[in-house]
Amino acid sequence: MSATTDLTEPATSAAEPAVADTAHRRVELGRFRQLSLVPAILVLMLIGFIVSPAFLTSDNLIGVLQQSTELSLLVLATTFILISGRMDLSLESTIGVAPVIAVWLVLPSSGGRFMGLGLFPEWMAVPLCLLVGAAIGAVNGFLILKLRLNGFIVTLGALTMLRGLQVALSEGQSIVELPSSFTYLGKASWLGAPAAIWVCAILFAAGGGALAWLRHGRALYAIGGNSEAARTAGIRVDRIVWIVLIIGSVLAAFAGILYSGHYGSISATQGSGWIFQVFAATVIGGVSLNGGRGSVFGALTGVLTLQLVVNVMTLAGVPPLWNQFLNGAIIIVALIISRFASGEKQE
């Protein structure tokens, strides 16, 4: 027994520095890549000013940031998940179904169009919404990590199932009678700016700090780069990935709270089609679909770039029907640029 232990422990201790060094190099390289969209953002702002002098007004710029808040939280969640080498398509449905379930549990049936259960007080709406998000992430993690099912198929199935649940509970109609606690963050202003902007800034700062300085945050790069090497180095791969999936779903549920509060209602199709914008922003922000590479700041610049493009097109009078085409084109162009810039093969 002791001989076996003596042979095993040095191998593990030798592998750990190698994995840590690999993760450190990925973080260092990411510091350069995360700034790559800054010139593009400056060019877009210049084009926007040329197209319309109203572009650089505070109302327009704050409006762009406000429109970016809900999408940015989904992008933040996707960044964590992609860096760990996983993928979660169900975030698109979580942003809609979590608020619907929360409101369904707290609003009593009043003979109106929406038939609620009224099991909990209204102040519980926000905690329940976040709890639903955590439950969705936990179930996805169980199916992927414990039952070893294909993550893409699991989350695709969850996306479809949760979308159906959202439509069924809302009876295919918008829910307009929302608890005041549910609408506060979407409508309140702090220091002259929407509260949602400040909340997103805090969450992005916390996420960036976690990836840069926390041991488990840095471990995500090692897991995404080579999960077997990370496991050999003593990193609890499944536990960390499971936690990341839960955090991602909680962020998606919180995005649903901000979105519902901003517009004062929950639509039966809330979040539908968002996954394409999420991946467009994440990919152009430098986050690798193969795992182990990317940064929170880079993902944030991807969101801002995407929203600025839409804003400039709107001011220029381009019909919004072209937005979906543009999102797909941006993803393909970003993949091509990433392929030739890094020398890595995108799969």
Image (cartoon, rainbow, N blue to C red):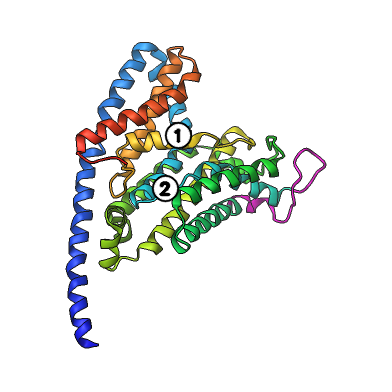
The tag earlier along the polypeptide, 1 or 2, is: 2
Q: Residues within 10 Å of mark 1 (few under 14, many from 20)?
A: some
Whether residue 161 is visible: yes
Instruction: Tell me the magenta residue range.
Output: 108-126
Give the camera-side residue of 315 and 164: 164
For image coordinates 47% across by 55% down, the residue present is 246
Q: How crowded is mark 2: few (under 14 residues within 10 Å), some or many (20 or more)?
A: many
Rendered-image quadrant of the C terminus: top left
Q: Does the magenta stretch include residue 265?
A: no
Question: Disc 1, disc 2: CB below 8 Å?
Answer: no
Q: What residue is disc 1 on? A: 276
For image coordinates 30% across by 33% down, the residue present is 335
Rendered-image quadrant of the N terminus: bottom left
Q: What residue is disc 2 on? A: 87
Residue 340 placement, left or right of 323: left
| Identity, as a three-letter code, of the amino acid under mark 1 | Phe
Whether residue 191 is visible: no
Q: Is residue 112 magenta?
A: yes
Q: Point out which mark residue 107 bears.
A: none
Q: Position of residue 141 (x, y in %)?
A: 47, 58
Q: Is mark 1 on a helix, strand or loop?
A: helix
Residue 194 vertical placement versus 142 (above, below): above
For image coordinates 74% across by 47% down, the residue present is 116
Q: Position of residue 232 (x, y in %)?
A: 26, 67
Predominant secondary structure in magenta? loop
